[in-house]
Amino acid sequence: MYDYDCYPQCPTKTVYDPPVRIYRDYYHPQIVQVIHPVEIVNRHHCVPCPQHIYSYSERDEWSTGKGHKG
């Protein structure tokens, strides 16, 4: 143990440290509207669809009677 009475009495001195800054963050919801533009494009295309059309021709042929036994 030290005996402080044997040393001369020094005057008390006050020393201040620089202040310490403590941050306490609080978060609050904030509504932010985000706009998403959408463009609808109607595209029209021609697509080949076959439509089968038949043309008919008719003719008469006359036989000469050769080879016909009658």
Image (tube, grey):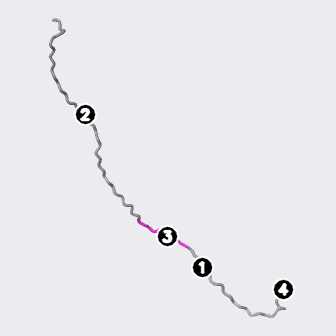
Q: Secondary structure at mark 2?
A: loop
- The location of residue 10, given as percent across then percent down, is 77, 93
The disc labelled 2 sits on which kind of residue?
His
User: Observer-nearest residue: 45 or 9?
Assistant: 45
On screen, 53 above or below 14?
A: above
The disc labelled 1 sits on which kind of residue?
Arg
On screen, 50 above or below 19?
A: above
Q: Give the residues drawn in magenta, as a range.
A: 25-33
Badge 1 or badge 3: first in the primary sequence = 1
Question: Mark number for residue 39?
Answer: none
Question: Mark number for residue 2?
Answer: 4
What residue is pinned by disc 3?
Answer: 28
Q: Disc 3 versus disc 2: distance between alpha carbons? A: 71 Å
User: Observer-nearest residue: 24 or 33?
Assistant: 33
Q: Disc 3 versus disc 4: distance between alpha carbons? A: 57 Å
- The answer to the question of whether label 1 and label 3 lie on touching residues, with beta carbons closer than 8 A, is no
- The location of residue 47, given as percent across then percent down, is 29, 43
The disc labelled 4 sits on which kind of residue?
Tyr
Badge 2: few (under 14), some or many (20 or more) residues near its Cα, within 10 Å? Answer: few
- Point out the image quarter for the C terminus: top left
On screen, 66 above or below 55?
A: above
